[in-house]
Amino acid sequence: MSSSILIFKKDPIVSLQGQPVLLFNQQHETLLEALEFKKIKIFSECRSGYCGACKTRVLSGKVNYLTPPLASLEADECLPCCCVPETNLNLDLSPDGVQVVTRPPHLLQKTLLLD
């Protein structure tokens, strides 16, 4: 008799300077599209042919590239226009004006104090 093991991979959380702003659940093709959908300020000229304009510093986490990046990158940089998060991702972008993701109050765990 053989047994099957199901492995579920959790969708990555994208944070800006430590503030969680979105759950990357494949609703968007690229990280850039997801950031733009959330109205996050990120400069990009990718669609105009200037590769490298969206270069962003990665504070922690990993990305997978859908196509090889055309611009040169440092080890701590990514091109959101052609990648998706592989793990939880913390980017060096300003969270100002962006709605931070929080758990609804009814889902927060209650702490029980035992005497």
Image (spheres, helix red, strand yellow):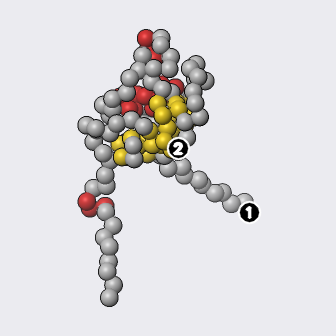
Instruction: Say if 39 sits above or below 111 in the image.
Output: above
Q: Is residue 23 visible?
A: no
Q: Residue 35 at x, y = what percent?
A: 38, 32
| Residue at disc 2, secondary structure | loop
Q: How packed is label 1: few (under 14 Cα within 10 Å), some, or many (20 or more)?
A: few
Hey, which quadrant is residue 27 in on the image? top left
In percent of width and height, residue 36 lies at 35, 28
Q: Identify whether 18 is placed above or below 112.
A: above
Furthest residue toward bottom: 115
Label 2 packing within 10 angstroms: few (<14), some (14-19), many (20+): some
- In depth, the one of 114 and 8 nearer the eye is 114
State the residue in front, 103 or 53. 53
Q: Position of residue 90 (x, y in %)?
A: 45, 43
Evaluate if marks 2 and 1 touch, with contact meaning CB atoms under 8 Å apart.
no
97 lies left or right of 2: left
* Type of amino acid at the residue the image marks with label 2: Gly
Q: Which mark is residue 1?
A: 1
Quadrant assignment for the C terminus: bottom left
Visible residue check, residue 31: yes
Disc 1 residue type (three-letter): Met
Which comes sooner in the sequence, label 2 or label 1? Answer: 1
| Left or right position of 45 against 70 | left
| Residue at numbered disc 2 | 61
Q: Residue at x 57, y 27 (%)?
A: 73
Q: Nearer the viewer, mark 2 or mark 1?
A: 2
**Residue placed furthest toward the top:** 49
